[in-house]
């Protein structure tokens, strides 16, 4: 055992004292954190760190005296730019505060509103959502817990007064008022008849006069029947079903036809679950699933619960309400999911609907079904959609585009080509040759020399994938007239060939193996010309095909002389730098890691990636060449070859499973120079050196 | 104490602290719940809450009971003028048949003095309308009326300001309080307050197509917001976007740029006055000057001198070219020239103009091409632009070019887009969806009456995950009508087509005076229907405006969208064409991959002839081509519809008069739509049977005529849409040294040039 010197002992003691002091301080701090709670006897609602309680069991009462101040009338000219206080909305995301639930009574002791189960669900959805904040000081949006969903269930004056009494009302700034049924008989105002001042209104029956675009939000009229609807794919028996109860009488006179079903209420039955016509009873709303189209028309109010019921049954809504602002119209392109008919065209309704093509019906139904499930399927989803829209308004630079809101993402094989601008890439840029190499220096140098004479080459990038050995000294490299740069990688990974190096300044990348020395300058130059005309595709030389093997029930990789191709190997191919970026950053399903691990199939992976995103096949350039090792025919090589083919087949099989589909496309053509094989003076002909084996 | 122990103690105490801090709420909650459950309010079991919750009524409970509507609301008459909507201020019945536009004649001299001069921009608007298919000279059949009075500049201090507009309007025979009138305006209001709706006259029920509109003044679904364009703006295309390459990442020198005036005082000055806060002279270049107007020195503030120095350091054009984002701040009015300039340059607009209604906002999804910032949060702009990812920048930049190209590149496009937006509001006109509007080639080139689904046009198939329909219709155009014998070219051609595995129907367009050969003279076509049609016989196919009362059948009839053509693919053939069946089949399989292009055999090229200072046309063998003649090629049937219903009547007239060049025009049309070259397949170049007697092709004038056609077409298009290609497509194993038995297209091997 070693003995401690005095000095060390003193140090040791000092350290001990320090440690104990530290521990004591830490414990004190920790306790004070809790003691603080003991000490402060704050009332529940002033504790801004926890969710508000939506417990209906203990609501505090709030009396509104008759003479209490009321909110100012709704400001019809409000817009996001002048009535919305954007300074309240910091951070990266909307934060929504919900006022505590209370029972409000007027001076006579009557409740000023009735809490409905729908509003309760909306509040619940907000409190559970990622947008919720318990702290009103951080809040961007304020939601009063005063239920104004139905005009018929509120005392307008009392609610106006209740709004004014809210702690953070401030003229209604950033307050969000929900209302589905607006207006009262006989006028039926299109907007909530309550003084709401500068508050935003999420309403269910706006017309284009009352809707303040970019400020208010248009909601669907929810139907309590929707949760009970189970989707049952049925054959469309009727072209059109009209089952709305409150139709204007002039809209009841549809032509008599056996593909049009006009339903009325039943005398004896409950009004919302049965419909009758000439003695026959139909159960509602499930009858809607038998219609191709369902008529939703303007009544005393513009919005109707039948709209969402039709959507839920995948019956295409035929909306006949001039100037009605459809649900979430700011972001949803309803042209893709419903038919809108001008009220004056009511009489030609049948003719219009009969002229809709079967294809269009298919598309409308598919889109309607998708929209319903994505944005409307329950109150929680509707509430979240609404806040997503508000969030997009407050943080417009992050906002989703109309395209993103309306594209059915799961549809395969739909393509969203990221290189969608139709253009022929400029010739002047040239391409960057990216050569992946390990240690075959001799062949690398030959290749560099060959490539460097291609006129359209801009730069050579050698990716030195060998960590055990340094690349040859720059002076050893062949002297070439184009810039040459060597990049030493950190690990021997195949994905290094597809890294979007900053050194690549051109759009086009030629990836080429260090042993592909048989391509002529004309061939490479022509390859680049072809790529310029198809800059969104892989354009290259060695081609392969995938074939479905019926006996093994698997995909097979084929490199024989075939009449079709579906892949162009990146051992010698041009592609846009964006694909390297995608390969590196957004390759699905861990394919990139798998390829790096197994040191194989990076070229197949790239072909899958591009084909999947663009829905386009690659382009093979010029006639077939013998690429590798023309004279190897011994048996050893053959077996290695066989093994190699098995592995490659397994890759295709694996990748197609990951994608859930086979994205590769088969084609029967290749690109040749316009005058290929033509008897034409060589001097006048471009690309003469093409096609020799 | 040993070091180990000490560490453990320290760690333990830290852990305790962490627990109290992060997990403490559990303790707090525990304590709180004890606190709140006061004796008067016993703890409510969860079950009770659930019960109460289910007892809540539905908001809808009273709604459906009222099944009869007693007071159907009518459109209120008071919703006029300031509150106009199409239903209240527009007479749809005028537009039920056609969407035609009447332009008032320019005012003759009268008691008010000389007719006011018309600014060049307004003249261009009128010319664009008058030379378009929208135009009518008959006010009775007009749906829209456009004034002969220049209303573009309504700034009373401006030199283009037209006086006495109210009395001039009063004298218009069809004014009718502005109903169905469209008023174009770029500037309204004047110094100092620039009131937006102050046009100096009452627009009544007229639709405004106006620049710089604010969301408060904009009548939703009624007005059209148009962009501000400068005095030299071209009438027709010619002004292409600047983005010539799609580099990724773009690696521009500057991230955000702006160079422009600032106003020091008054309305709209604040935003530009505070831009200097963002300027860092490195990647953010935001320079302003107060040096404008006569008396700038009197109005200048303390920063002016410094600003001017900085301002002079940068060149505007080079900022546009070298910046990823371009700031578009409001000026006195909400819109500015910057917007279109940035759009054209592919410099992504960053909008600082609160409440501005962007041009054509009802149809164009600007989120795909621009970034909104907020004047109130000016200082956040750098952070916002830095947060945009490089792949989104790539997409935004491409979209600026598509929008520029399709809707903003010329006055004609802006006017037509305005018309199409109004037209889509008509009850009887189909609406195009947002994908069509925001994808190349856009709404102006996608006629919604053709079909109700994009499935039937060649443009959105990829994004819909669809492929073109199977099979093709062969359309043979017969101009000579030589004797039909088993040796004649036409007979052999029909036989080759019949053997094709993809043919759906054969349509022979008999455009000659010779009699149609009797049925038994035609080769046996098995189950494939063969129809012989005399072009021009089907209703409405002869357009009087094109033929000008002349009896001859226009050669454009070969591209008429005959109802017999049901397949997406059309194989267009001349009667003396000598392709074999394999060639047809191969070309068809290639077309399936390029359904938006012309895919075929006879390649031609255009070139710029410096000596003549004109476009030249050549049929010589070259290393490139830009035209594939429709004498032997596949294309989508939508182009027949577009050719017949969209092309300017001037073009169709040229074709009719020369009875020539229809194939060149089709190539210009398709390249204009796709911005891509056609595709030539295989080596074959000669495709005409040399022996089939007198052909118009042998006429020496024929060629000169085609040259002149090409130049006329380019002039009417406003630019040369043709694009060159350097490649042709051959079968994969074409001329490869393998056994012919392995090849699928063996006959093609034998064809040669």
Image (spheres, coloured by chain):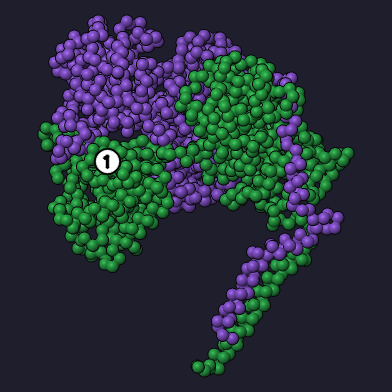
Chain colours: A green, B purple
B2 left or right, relative to B683: right
| Residue nearest the viewer, comparing A119 with B143 | A119
B724 left or right, relative to A688: right
Identify the residue shown where x is 54% and y is 13%.
B94
Quarter of the rendering containing residue B511: top left
| Residue nearest the viewer, comparing B585 with A556 | A556
Q: In this view, does B56 lie above or below B81?
A: below
Identify the residue shown where x is 60% and y is 36%.
A230
| Residue nearest the viewer, comparing A484 with A535 | A535
Q: Pointer 1: what residue?
A: A565
At mark 1, the secondary structure is loop
Could you tell me which quadrant the N terminus of chain B lies in? bottom right
Q: Where is residue A379 shown, x and y percent of the image?
A: 64, 40
Could you tell me which quadrant the C terminus of chain B lies in? top left
Q: Where is residue B674 shown, x and y percent of the image?
A: 35, 30
Q: In this view, which residue lies farthest toward the front? A: A551
Identify the residue shown where x is 35% and y is 55%.
A595
Q: In this view, which residue lies farthest toward the right? A: A108
Q: In this view, does B191 lie above or below A64?
A: above
How many callouts does the rendering have?
Answer: 1
Identify the residue shown where x is 19% and y is 41%.
A623
Q: In this view, does A231 lie above or below A574?
A: above
Q: Where is residue A458 shown, x and y percent of the image?
A: 26, 49
Quarter of the rendering containing residue A246: top right
Dot 1 crowding, Cα within 10 Å, few <14, some 14–19, many 20+: many
Q: Can residue B346 be seen in this view?
A: no
Q: Where is residue A121 shown, x and y percent of the image?
A: 69, 43
State which chain disc 1 sits on. Answer: A
Quarter of the rendering containing residue A215: top right
A452 left or right, relative to A220: left
Q: Is residue A263 visible?
A: yes
């Amino acid at each position: 055992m070693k003995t401690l010197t005095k000095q060390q002992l003193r140090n040791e003691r000092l350290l001990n004292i320090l440690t104990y002091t530290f521990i004591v301080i830490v414990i004190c701090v920790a306790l004070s954190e809790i003691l603080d709670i003991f000490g402060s006897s704050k009332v529940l609602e002033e504790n801004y760190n926890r969710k508000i309680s939506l417990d209906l069991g203990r609501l505090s009462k709030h009396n509104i005296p008759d003479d209490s101040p009321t909110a100012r009338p709704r400001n019809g000219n409000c817009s996001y730019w002048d009535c919305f206080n954007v300074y309240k909305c910091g951070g990266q995301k909307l934060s929504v505060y919900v006022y505590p639930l209370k029972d409000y009574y007027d001076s006579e002791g009557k409740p000023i509103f009735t809490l409905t189960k729908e509003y309760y669900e909306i509040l619940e959805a907000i409190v559970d959502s990622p947008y919720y904040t318990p702290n009103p000081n951080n809040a961007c949006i304020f939601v009063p817990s005063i239920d104004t969903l139905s005009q018929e269930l509120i005392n307008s004056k009392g609610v106006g007064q209740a709004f004014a009494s809210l702690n953070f009302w401030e003229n209604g700034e950033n307050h969000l008022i929900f209302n589905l049924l607006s207006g009262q008989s006989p006028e039926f105002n299109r907007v909530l008849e309550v003084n709401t001042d500068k508050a935003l209104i999420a309403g269910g029956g706006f017309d284009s006069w009352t809707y303040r675009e970019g400020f208010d939000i248009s909601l669907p009229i929810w139907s309590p029947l929707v949760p009970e609807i189970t989707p049952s794919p049925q054959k469309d028996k009727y072209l059109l079903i009209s089952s709305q109860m409150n139709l204007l009488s002039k809209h009841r006179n549809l032509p008599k036809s056996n593909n049009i079903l006009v339903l009325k209420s039943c005398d004896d039955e409950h009004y919302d679950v049965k419909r009758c016509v000439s003695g026959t009873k139909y159960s509602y709303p499930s009858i809607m699933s038998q219609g191709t189209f369902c008529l939703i028309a303007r009544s005393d109010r513009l919005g109707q619960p039948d709209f969402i019921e039709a959507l839920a049954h995948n019956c295409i809504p035929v909306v006949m309400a001039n100037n009605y602002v459809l649900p979430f119209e700011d972001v949803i392109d309803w042209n893709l999911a419903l038919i809108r008919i001008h009220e004056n065209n009511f009489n030609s309704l049948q003719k219009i609907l009969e002229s809709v093509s079967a294809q269009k019906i298919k598309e409308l139904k598919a889109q309607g079904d998708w929209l319903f499930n994505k944005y409307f399927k329950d109150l929680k989803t509707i509430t979240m959609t609404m806040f997503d829209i508000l969030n997009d308004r407050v943080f417009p630079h992050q906002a989703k585009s109309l395209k993103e809101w309306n594209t059915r993402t799961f549809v395969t094989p739909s393509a969203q080509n990221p290189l969608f601008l139709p253009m022929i890439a400029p010739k002047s840029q040239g391409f960057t040759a990216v050569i992946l190499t390990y240690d075959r220096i001799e062949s690398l140098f030959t290749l560099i020399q060959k490539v460097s004479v291609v006129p359209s080459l801009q730069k050579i990038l050698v990716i030195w994938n060998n960590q055990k050995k340094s690349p040859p000294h720059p002076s050893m490299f062949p002297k070439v007239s184009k810039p040459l740069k060597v990049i030493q990688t950190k690990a021997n990974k195949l994905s290094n060939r597809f890294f979007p190096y900053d050194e690549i300044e051109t759009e086009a990348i030629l990836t080429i193996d260090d042993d592909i020395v048989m391509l002529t300058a004309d061939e490479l130059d022509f390859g680049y010309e072809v790529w310029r005309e198809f800059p969104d595709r892989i354009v290259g030389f060695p081609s392969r095909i995938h074939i479905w093997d019926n006996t093994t029930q698997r995909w097979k990789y084929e490199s024989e002389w075939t009449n079709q191709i579906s892949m162009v190997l990146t051992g010698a191919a041009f592609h846009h730098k964006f694909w390297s970026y995608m390969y590196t950053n957004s390759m699905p399903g861990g394919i990139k890691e798998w390829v790096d691990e197994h040191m194989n199939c990076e070229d197949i992976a790239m072909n899958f990636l591009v084909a999947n995103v663009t829905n386009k096949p690659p382009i093979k350039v010029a006639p077939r060449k013998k690429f590798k090792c023309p004279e190897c025919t011994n048996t050893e090589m053959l077996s290695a070859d066989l093994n190699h083919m098995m592995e490659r087949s397994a890759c295709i099989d694996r990748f197609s499973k990951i994608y859930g589909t086979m994205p590769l496309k088969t084609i029967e053509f290749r690109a040749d120079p316009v005058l290929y094989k033509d008897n034409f003076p060589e001097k006048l002909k471009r690309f003469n050196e093409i096609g020799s084996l | 104490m040993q070091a180990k122990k000490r560490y453990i103690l320290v760690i333990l105490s830290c852990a305790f602290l962490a627990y109290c801090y992060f997990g403490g709420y559990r303790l707090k909650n525990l304590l709180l719940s004890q606190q709140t459950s006061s004796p008067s309010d016993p703890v409510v079991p969860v079950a009770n809450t659930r019960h109460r919750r289910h007892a809540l009524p539905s908001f809808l409970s009273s709604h459906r009971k009222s099944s009869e509507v007693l007071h159907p609301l009518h459109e209120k008459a008071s919703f006029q003028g300031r509150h106009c909507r199409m239903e209240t201020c527009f007479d749809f019945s005028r537009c039920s048949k056609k969407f035609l536009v009447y332009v008032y004649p320019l005012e003759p001299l009268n008691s008010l003095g000389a007719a006011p001069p018309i600014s060049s921009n307004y003249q261009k608007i009128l010319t664009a309308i008058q030379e378009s298919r929208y135009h009518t000279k008959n006010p009775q059949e007009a749906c829209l009326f456009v004034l002969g009075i220049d209303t573009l500049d309504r700034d009373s201090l401006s030199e283009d300001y037209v006086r006495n507009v109210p009395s001039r309007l009063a004298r218009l025979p069809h004014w009718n309080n502005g109903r169905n009138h469209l008023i174009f305006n770029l500037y309204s209001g004047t110094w100092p307050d620039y009131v937006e709706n102050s046009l100096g006259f009452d627009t009544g029920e007229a639709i405004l197509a106006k620049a710089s509109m604010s969301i408060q003044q904009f009548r939703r679904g009624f007005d059209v917001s148009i962009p501000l364009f400068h005095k030299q703006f071209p009438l027709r295309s010619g002004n292409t976007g600047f983005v010539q390459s799609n580099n990724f990442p773009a690696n521009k020198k500057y991230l955000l740029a702006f160079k422009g005036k600032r106003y020091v005082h008054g309305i709209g000055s604040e935003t530009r006055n505070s831009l200097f806060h963002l300027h860092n002279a490195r990647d953010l270049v935001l320079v302003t000057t107060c040096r404008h107007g006569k008396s700038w020195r009197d109005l200048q503030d303390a920063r002016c001198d410094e600003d001017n120095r900085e301002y002079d350091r940068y060149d505007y054009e080079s900022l546009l070219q070298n910046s990823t984002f371009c700031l578009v701040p409001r000026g006195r009015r909400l819109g500015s020239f910057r917007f279109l300039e940035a759009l054209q340059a592919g410099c992504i607009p960053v909008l600082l103009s609160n409440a501005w209604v962007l041009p054509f906002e009802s149809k164009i999804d600007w989120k795909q091409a621009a970034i909104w910032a907020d004047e109130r949060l000016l200082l956040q702009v750098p952070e916002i632009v830095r947060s945009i990812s490089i792949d989104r920048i790539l997409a935004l930049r491409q979209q600026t070019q598509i929008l520029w190209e399709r809707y903003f590149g010329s006055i004609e496009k802006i006017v037509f887009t305005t018309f199409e937006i109004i037209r889509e509001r008509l009850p009887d006109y189909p609406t195009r969806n947002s994908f069509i509007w925001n994808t190349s080639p856009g709404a102006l080139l996608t006629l919604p009456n053709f079909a109700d689904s994009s499935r039937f046009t060649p443009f959105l198939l990829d994004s819909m995950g669809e492929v073109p329909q199977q099979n093709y219709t062969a359309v043979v155009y017969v101009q000579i009508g030589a004797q039909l014998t088993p040796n004649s070219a036409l007979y052999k051609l029909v036989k080759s087509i019949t053997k094709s595995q993809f043919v759906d129907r054969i349509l022979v367009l008999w455009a000659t005076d010779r009699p149609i050969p009797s049925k038994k003279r035609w080769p046996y076509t098995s189950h494939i229907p063969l129809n012989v049609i005399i072009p021009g016989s089907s209703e409405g196919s002869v357009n009087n405006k094109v033929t000008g009362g002349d009896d001859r059948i226009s050669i454009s009839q070969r591209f008429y969208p005959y109802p017999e053509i049901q397949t997406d693919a059309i194989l267009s053939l001349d009667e003396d064409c000598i392709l074999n069946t394999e060639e047809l089949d191969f070309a068809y399989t290639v077309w399936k991959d390029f359904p938006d292009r012309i895919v075929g055999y006879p390649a031609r090229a255009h070139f710029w002839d410096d000596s003549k200072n004109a476009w030249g046309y050549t049929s010589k063998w070259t290393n490139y081509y830009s035209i594939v003649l429709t004498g032997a090629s596949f294309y989508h049937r939508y182009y027949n519809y577009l050719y017949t219903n969209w092309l300017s009547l001037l073009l169709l007239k040229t074709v009719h008069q020369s009875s020539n060049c229809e194939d060149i025009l089709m190539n210009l049309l398709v390249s204009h739509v796709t911005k891509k070259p056609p595709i030539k397949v295989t080596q074959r170049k000669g495709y005409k049977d040399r022996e089939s007697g007198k052909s118009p092709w042998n006429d020496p004038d024929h060629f000169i005529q085609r040259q002149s056609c090409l130049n006329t077409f380019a002039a009417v298009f406003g630019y040369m849409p043709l694009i060159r290609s350097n490649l042709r497509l051959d079968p994969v194993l074409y001329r490869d040294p393998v056994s012919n038995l392995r090849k699928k297209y063996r006959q093609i091997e034998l064809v040669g040039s």
